[in-house]
Amino acid sequence: MRTRMRMGATGRRRLTMAAVSTVLAFGAIVLSRAQGVNADQPRPESRAHLHAPPDTNTRVHVGTPELTGFVALTQGAVLAHGTRELFAELRVEARDVHGETRRRPVAIAVVLDTSGSMSGEKIEQARRSVLALAARMRPEDQLAVVAYDMNARVVQPLAPIGHVREMLARTVGQISAGGGTNIPSGLALGAVALSDAPASMIRRLVLVSDGLDGSGLQLSDVRRAVGSRADAGTTTSALGVGTDYDERWLTTMADAGRGNYEFLANGNALAPFLARELEQASTTVADGARLDLALPSGWRVAQVYGGSYQGGGVPLGSLFAGERRRVTLRLEVDAGAPGTARALGLQLRYRSAALATERNLDLGELSVAVVGEPSEVAASTDVTLHAEVIAQRVDVVQAQAIDAWREGRAAEAQRLTQDNIATLQGWRAQAPEASNMIDERIEAASVDLDNFDNVDARSSAGRAHGLRSNARRHYRMDSF
C-alpha cells in the first residue's frame, strides 16, 4: 500500500511555484541543471501535426513464446553538426507460457546478517522466516542457509528440502547474533553453496542485512563478482532491515545481481519477501537474457536508467512469468552532416527455461536521420515515449535530492525537487497518455518535498522516509 503523507503549507507553496515555472521552462530545459540536457532537445509544443522523416525505423518488436516487448528510439532524427542526445528504450515482459508456466525446481541460498544489531526480535523473525520459506518449498527444491557477521559460516549446506525439513528447525534455531558485518564474505559463501546445485535448477541468492559493511572491500569489486554470477545464472536479491543498513551496498548488489531490492522498517515482512523470491524463481521462463547493441561509429552509451551497459550489451538476467523489465539508455551521438542516416543493430539472446534451448534473435536495426532543422527533429519525436523517459531521468535526479537532504543540503534538495515537479507537470500537459506514470512521480516528489521541509533527515522517521522513497523509486524503474 502506498504511504501518503499530508503536504504542509510550505510544500503547497512550492508546488504552486513549480507549476508557474512550468510555463517558463519545459522538461529538457529544467533538467539541464542536473543532467546537462542538450539545448537542441525539441520542445514538446512544437511536435503537433508533424510527421517523422522518411526511411527511418524507430521501433522493433520482441515476440517469442517466452518474451514480448519492444526496443525503440524516442525520436527518428537528430540535428546535424554536433554531439546530440538520443534515448533508446527497452521494455520486455516474460510470458506465462500457454497460461500454465511449469514450475521449475529452485535452489535458494539465504545469506543472513547475524551481526550484533540483529539481536533480539530481528534474529527471532529471521529464524521464523527461514522456516516459513522451507515450509513453502517442494521436496525437490534445495535450500542453503549462510550466516555472517565479520565471518561467514554455513548453517545449512545446500540440500533437498525433503531430506532436511525435519531437522531444519533445530539447525536454524542455533543461529545467534553478535559481532560486526562483512557482507562480501556472506555473499561469497552463499555463492559457493549454490554452486553445488544441478545445472537444471534455478539459482537465487537472497542477501539480508541491517547494518553497514565493515569488510573494507571496494563496492565496485564486489559488484563485478555479483554481476559475473548473475551472467552465469545466479540471481541476487537484497533486503534491508531497519533504518541503519548500507543502502548503497544493497541496491548495488540487487542491480548487479538482476534481483529485487526492498526496505523493511522491521523484520515482520521478511517471510513474505522470501516467499515472493521462491515464487518468482520457480516460474522463471528465460535465463541469462541480454540485449546486445551494435553501436554506429561516433555513438556511445552515456547513461543507463534501470539497468547497466556491459561489454556492448544490456544484461537482463532471469525473467519469471509476468515479470517486466525496463531499461533506458541515454546515448550521445556524433551527428555529422545532414542527409545521412545511422543504424543501431540489436540482438536478443537468452535460454528458454522450459525447453532448455538457447535463443539468439536478430531484431534488426533502429535508424536515425541526420537533419538540418530543429522542426524536423521535433516532428520525429514520439512525445509519449519521450515523456516517459524524462520521468525515468527525474527519478534519478530525485535520488540525488534525497542524498542532498541526508547530507544537510536541504535547500539543494528542495530546488531539485521543485524542478522535477515542474518538469513532470510540463510533460504531463503535452503527453496525456503518459499521465499515470508521470502522476505517480509527481506524488512521490511532493511527499519528498514535504519531508524535506518538516522532517530531520537524521531522525528515525527521516532515515525511514529516505530508504522507503528510494526503494519505491527503485521498484518503479521497471514499471510500464
Image (tube, rainbow, N blue to C red):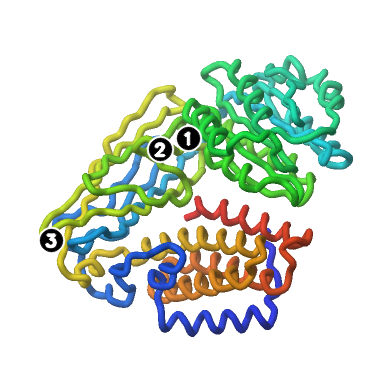
Q: Position of residue 294 (x, y in %)?
A: 26, 40
**Circle 1 sits on which residue?**
317
Which of the two discs, 2 and 1, labels the residue nearer the N terminus? 2
**Circle 3 sits on which residue?**
338
Q: Amino acid at mark 3?
A: Pro
Q: Is residue 155 left or right of residue 417?
A: right
Look at 75% across and 61% down and name the residue there: 458
- Separation of residues labelled 1 and 3 (CA atoms): 39 Å
Q: Secondary structure at mark 3?
A: loop
Q: Position of residue 235 (x, y in %)?
A: 55, 32
Vertical side of 360 occupied by 125: above or below = below
- Quarter holding residue 118: top right
Tell me the crowding category of disc 2: few under 14, some 14 to 19, or many 20 or more residues within 10 angstroms, Cα based.
Answer: few
Q: Position of residue 153 (x, y in %)?
A: 74, 22
Which of the two discs, 3 and 2, labels the residue nearer the N terminus? 2
Q: Amino acid at mark 2?
A: Gln
